[in-house]
Every structure is written in C-alpha cells, then in structure tokens.
Image (cartoon, grey):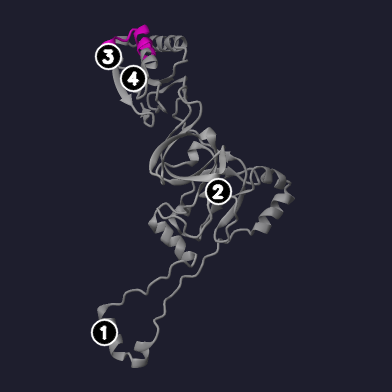
Amino acid sequence: MTENIGQPEIDIPLHLNNLRVGERYTFYLLNAPNVGIRATLLRKWPASPSYTSNVLVFKVISPPTEVSLQLARVDRITQSYIGPNTYTAGEINSWLGGRKLRRKTRSRKKRKSRKKRKTKKRRGGRRKTRIKKKMIGGGKTKEEIIAELKSKGRYDEWIALGSKFGLTSDTLKAKFFLVRPYKYYNVDGKIVNVSMVQKTYRDDVDNIAVFKQLYVKDPTHVDQSKFRIVDIKETLSTAGLATCTGLAMIIGTKKFMTHLDAGTNIQKIISTVGMLIEEEEIDPSSIEPIIYAGDLDSRITLQKAKDICLSVGIPAENFVVKNVCMMDTVKI
C-alpha cells in the first residue's frame, strides 16, 4: 500500500466494521487527542465478558511494538491511504497530475525508420511527454449539496452528525472506488453505498451528503449467550470465542448452535434441545456435537457445553472438541 499520495487524512467511523486488518491507521486517544499513533491493525474482536469494549491489536510503526487497545479509549481514527495497493496509488496519482505517462514503446522497425529521418535539430530537441488530464467527478458541487440540504430542512442535522461526505466515482476508474463497502443514509433517507467517508469535499469524485451509517448483520450469526435452530439446509455461524465456547449439532432435519459465555443459563437450552430430539424422533446416542472451545481460559463455558449434551442423553464419547482462536468464525 502506498501512503500520502496527494490527499488529506480521512476520518474513519469508530466501528469495528470500518477497520480492516492489515490497513495502516492513525489512532488518537481520549487522553491525548492531539497526538497521533501510526500503526497497522493486526487483529480485532468484539466485546466479551473478558473485554468490556471492542478490542484492537495493532503494531506501532515507531518504535516497532505490538499493542492491545480498547476501542472505547479511542477519540478518533484517521487514514491517509486512498488506495489499497500500489496499482491504485499509481492510477489516482495519474489523474491528480502526479505522474507522467511515458510514450508507448514503438516497434523496432518503426524506431529504425524514425532514426533515419531524424535531423540534427530534432535529435537535440527536447522530448515531449504526454500528461494525462485530471478527471472530474461529475457530481454535485459543494454549494449544490448544501443548498439541497437546506431546502429539505436537514442541514442542521447533517452538521450535528459531523457534516460528512460519502465518496464514490464512476469516472475515476481506480480500483478503490469500484469497491463500496459502506452503507449510509442520504438526504432522502435512502441507502447509498460509498467507498469512503470524510469531512472534506473532493472535486475529483462524486460527493454525497451522508447521515447515519447502516450496519448489515450476518444473517447466519449466533449472538453471544444466545442459541438458534434452523433447517438443515441453512447455515449457522458464530465468532469471538475467547473465553466462550460454541456448541453445534445436527438433530434430524434441524441445525442447532449456541454461543456460551460464563453467564449463560443453560437450563432453557437443555429443555429446548431435549424437546427437539423428541420431535425429530432421534436417538441422542447418534448425535455427534461439535464443541468449539475458545483459546483463552474457556474451562467454565466448555463444561457448560458438555453439561448440555450429557443432560439430553448424548454420550461423552460422541463429543468432538475443537480449539479455536477468538478471531475464527465457526460454521455448521
């Protein structure tokens, strides 16, 4: 990835979904809001009983060291990159006038014939280089956007939410702008997909006044301390198993999964699974439960998973226990 190629740093919304592992950011803490920490994000995981807040693990550039940090301690996060790799940086630089394009290589035959026709004056002349023109976004100007906000009575609300612009482009054909992972509501309350969000208006791309962000939840996900039962053709998943344990099994024509933490009451789960076994007319000794034990101290929740299985008649020799990292997503 290439940094600082002609654009100011942009503000990243403080949510785990907006932070990508492997990307480089600048972190500003609540107790030192004017001091930026340049670091590369290595890992991230949501809040759990062991961590009261979302946790980030990143590698500080100078001095090189690995640091864990709760997201609740962060005042703001910025990023000075506008492309995910060197190719994108080159593409954007070319439109910003930061790079000159070389002439296309001529065939050997054409070069020889041209060389014969050259005069002394032309040999001593300066070689011209074609410069690619800067492309314009083609969207609304900043004044037009503000005028629309005021006419629809949402200007004050937009200012209160940070006066942010969502950036997209159909003309600036850099790879970064072809990916639009963030969903926001626009002035009309409709959902728009954007490549990035910042407070600064950019003339070279399309700008959209955005309001609140829309977070799309994985429909297969099982929340912490919850359980779900679905048809056997569907998928269930969970993640963040640090001190927690996941329990999954196929019961007849159904799939079951639960994400157990230290405070989970397993009596309701035992009752539900027992009734499901009766409804499906399944012999409990034929069920092979998969137990996903977190890589930290998950002894309490691991025992809960075993107690659930034993209480409904599943023998211990059928247990399949797998140790997983808190960053792993497990599925059934």
Any part of residue 283 in sight: no
In this rendered view, identify the residue nearer to me: 75 or 264. 75
Mark 3 lies on a secondary structure that is helix
Mark 2 lies on a secondary structure that is strand
Q: CA distance from mark 3 to mark 4?
A: 11 Å
Q: Quadrant of residue 123?
A: bottom left
Magenta stretch: includes residue 291: no
Mark 4 lies on a secondary structure that is strand
User: Which is nearer the N-term, disc 1 or disc 3?
Assistant: 1
Residue furthest to the bottom in view is 120
Q: Residues within 10 Å of mark 1 (few under 14, many from 20)?
A: few
Of the numbered discs in the image, which one, if any, rests on residue 112?
1
Amino acid type assigned to the residue bearing label 3 in the image: Asn
Q: Residue at x 65, y 46 (%)?
A: 188
Extent of the magenta region: 304-317
In this rendered view, identify the residue nearer to me: 167 or 218. 167
Q: Residues within 10 Å of mark 3 (few under 14, many from 20)?
A: some
Of the numbered discs in the image, which one, if any, rests on residue 318?
3
Report if the CB atoms under discs 3 and 4 are less than 8 Å apart. no
